[in-house]
Each structure stands twice: as structure tokens, then as C-alpha cells.
Image (cartoon, helix red, strand yellow):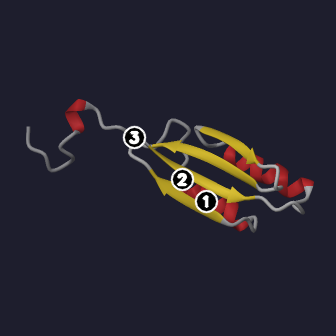
Amino acid sequence: MPASGVSAEALAARLSALGLPVRMEEHDLHTTVEAEVPESLDAELWREALEVVADADRFGLLATSLNDRTLWAVVRKVVPTTGDVGGPSHQR
């Protein structure tokens, strides 16, 4: 789990619970969670959405001139230490 102690799945579930359409993308070292933010989102839901992504390792907002807004968050994946590379069944 990342240093923040939160998982990408948990972030996605919390954003989805706020009624935001969410998508996730897996990468080698991190997972990206993106949520489309409608123009009509009220201030309280904005606050809640920002509280959710604040738990991520990085977050931001991508806004275009076409009024598209995407709230994004990045959660780093744990990289095993040298001694744990083989996993729990690896014999030493």
C-alpha cells in the first residue's frame, strides 16, 4: 500500500459514491483514478471530492476550454524490497 495508506480502489469507490463517473488505469508503478466533474457540481460535493483525492499520493484537476473537467489522483504501488522479490513462497 502507498505511504498514504489508501488504495486506488477505495478512492474510486468514494468518488463514485459522490455520483461522479470514475475510471481507473493501471501502470507499472502507480494507478491513476479519474473522475469527470460536471459543471453543475455544488460546493459541498466539490469539497467532498477534494477531501477524497487529498488522500492520494498526487492529485489535480484538468480543465479544458470546452468546460470538460477531470479530477485525477495517483496512488503509488508498493515496490518490493530486494529480499521480498520472490514473494512469500520464495525459498531463500
The residue labelled by disc 1 is 12
Q: Amino acid at mark 3?
A: Val
Quadrant the N terminus occupies? top left
Residue 58 numbered tag? none
Q: Is residue 58 left or right of residue 37?
A: left
Tag count in the figure?
3
Residue 8 numbered tag? 2
Furthest residue toward left: 92
Helix, strand or loop at mark 1: helix
Q: Is residue 42 left or right of residue 36?
A: right
Q: Could you tell me which residue is drawn at 56 percent across and 44 percent down? A: 74
Dot 2 alpha-carbon crowd within 10 angstroms: few under 14, some 14 to 19, many 20 or more: many
Q: Could you tell me which residue is drawn at 38 percent across and 45 percent down? A: 28
Are the residues tagged 1 and 2 within 8 Å (C-beta)?
yes
Res 17 quadrant in image: bottom right
Helix, strand or loop at mark 3: loop
Q: Amino acid at mark 1?
A: Ala
Whole-angstrom CA distance, mark 1 to mark 2, is 6 Å
Helix, strand or loop at mark 2: helix
Q: Amino acid at mark 2?
A: Ala
Whole-angstrom CA distance, mark 3 to mark 2, is 12 Å
Furthest residue toward top: 82
Q: Could you tell me which residue is drawn at 76 percent across and 47 percent down? A: 50
Locate residue 85, reporting x and y percent.
Answer: 22, 39
Locate residue 46, reporting x and y percent.
Answer: 83, 52
The residue labelled by disc 3 is 78
